[in-house]
Image: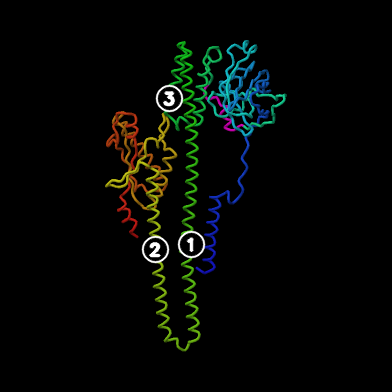
Amino acid sequence: MTEPTMHHRIGRLFLAAALSLAALCPAAAQQLPPVPRSDVTFRTVTIRYPFDREVRVPMVGTQRFGANVSGEAVVERRSSITKISLTLKRLPRPATVGPMAATYVMWAVTPEGICDNLGEYRKRQSDTLDGWFGSEISTTTRHRNFSLIVTAEPHYLVTSPSRLVVAANAEVRTGQVFVADNEIDFSGDADVENRIVSPEPPAAGRDPRYPPELLQAQRARDIARYYEADQLAPQLMAAAGDAFAAAEDLYRRGRRDEAAETADTAIRLAERARRIATARRAAERRRQELAAKDDVIAELQDRVGQIPTLQAQLDNERRLRREVEADRERLRDAYNRLAADKTQGDANTASLREEIRRLRSELDRAQAATREARIKALREELARLFGDARFEARGSVLVLPDSDFITTPRQPMALTPAAMAKLDRLVEFLRLTEAAVRIEAYSDNTGTEQSRQDFCRERGQLVLGYLTARGIPTERVQAFAMGNTNPRQPNTTPRGRTANRRVELILPPPSELESATATP
């Protein structure tokens, strides 16, 4: 390798390091992009209410959803709270406003975009009485400067307003009240508001005493399913389903009040499941982002680690070049002493070759040390990723719990994204160490012996197939169906059975790996 070529290679390594740092720190490489606005904006006015003074605010319906709606809000600011009493007339049934709508919610929206859910707004069951007298709600908010809007919602526990605005406050033309324009930017997934996962029960439109909580519970469960809460929060979703079924049964038996209370429990459970599912999806996305950054950092460190070696090679080549030039000069100046100098030249050549062999030996040792460090780092990362890991005489035992498998009726068994991430790191470890792995799939004590063996065999083959599909030779991977042998906990409780449904991955002891990796 010539000196300019070596310079170019080192220069490329520094350039790659700089680009990798820029990718990890985008704020340092370019200005941050502006915060994106939502695709829907509702324009209204915000009012700043004076202390200890009652203000009557007209409410008007929107052209799209509430053209016939009218009403008034009585607002009074006292100490640290603002009291609000709202009356609206001629509200349509929520279901006529949007396919997912089941009730109305009143909101206080500040100019800064803070949306405060002020409570559920229910219209009278009689359209005639609602047209004459309207429906009223009294509530409070901590804000002083805000807009009032009423939206159609799937249930009353929503955390942000939908795009289905049926009424909003108008401008107040009186002294001592500050009025300004306000733009409400709606965020969230518009597709949720337009989906009908399950049809509205016929009784909801036929029975004037049909508990609105039942329809809200149905919509809350629909939305939670949209956010994959069945997979991400299955226990809460199961509890919400049981509560909803119990509420429907109470309604059919004529116990409407109890049905409403039970349906309210279903609403709360489904909404909690949705929030947990949303948080877990966000956490998974964040974990993937961090994993991608870790990969970039590892690649950067690997490239930076090559620089000293290449620099040493460059220095060595420079030294050799100087020595060769000196030899050439000496040969040119002492041509008549060629015979005598030949012996010295041979000695110099042998010395250079010995130096090259020594440097190569040092390079081999450095590469071996780097490989050992990588193996150690991967073993520690595997222990952290799997969490449930232990060390036995037969080797390191990594455990895939029952939650790492997706098992649904009429669908093939599959691995969760978290399980795939764990196995990807295991694949990297196996490629580096060329170690073998033993897969032991366990079940609980439910079912027949044959069904337990089939269950274990399917899980073991699923993990084996994932590893071999990523390049691990089949002769280094063995899968065994262990049935309900070697339970980790008693099979007398659901928790114990869940703990016993697992797949264990056994790696050779570190001592065997060290001897294997030390062999050239």
Report the predominant secondary structure element of the magenta stretch.
Answer: loop
Which badge, 3 or 1, is on the more N-terminal residue?
3
> For the residue marked with disc 2, what is the amino acid?
Asp
Colour option used: rainbow
> For the residue marked with disc 1, what is the amino acid?
Ile
Q: Tell me the mark number nearer the camera, choosing from 1 and 2.
A: 1
- Residue 94 is left or right of residue 383, and the answer is right
Which badge, 1 or 2, is on the more N-terminal residue?
1
Q: Which residue is mark 3?
A: 239
Q: Which residue is at a point 62% across and 13% down the rendered structure image?
A: 130
* Residue at the extreme bottom: 336
Q: Which mark is residue 364?
A: 2
- Residue 519 is left or right of residue 278, and the answer is left
Which badge, 3 or 2, is on the more N-terminal residue?
3
The span from disc 3 to disc 1 (Cα, nearest Å) is 59 Å
Q: Which mark is residue 307?
A: 1
- Label tally: 3
Residue 207 seen by the camera: no
* Image location of residue 432, percent across then percent down: 39, 53
Query: In this orientation, which residue lies closer to the viewer: 485 or 412?
Result: 485
**The C terminus sits in image quarter:** bottom left
Query: In this orientation, which residue lies closer to the viewer: 18 or 520?
Result: 18
Name above or below for residue 141 compared with residue 344.
Answer: above
> For the residue marked with disc 3, what is the amino acid?
Ala
Figure quadrant of residue 141: top right
User: Callout 1: helix, strand or loop?
Assistant: helix
* Image location of residue 102, percent across then percent down: 56, 21
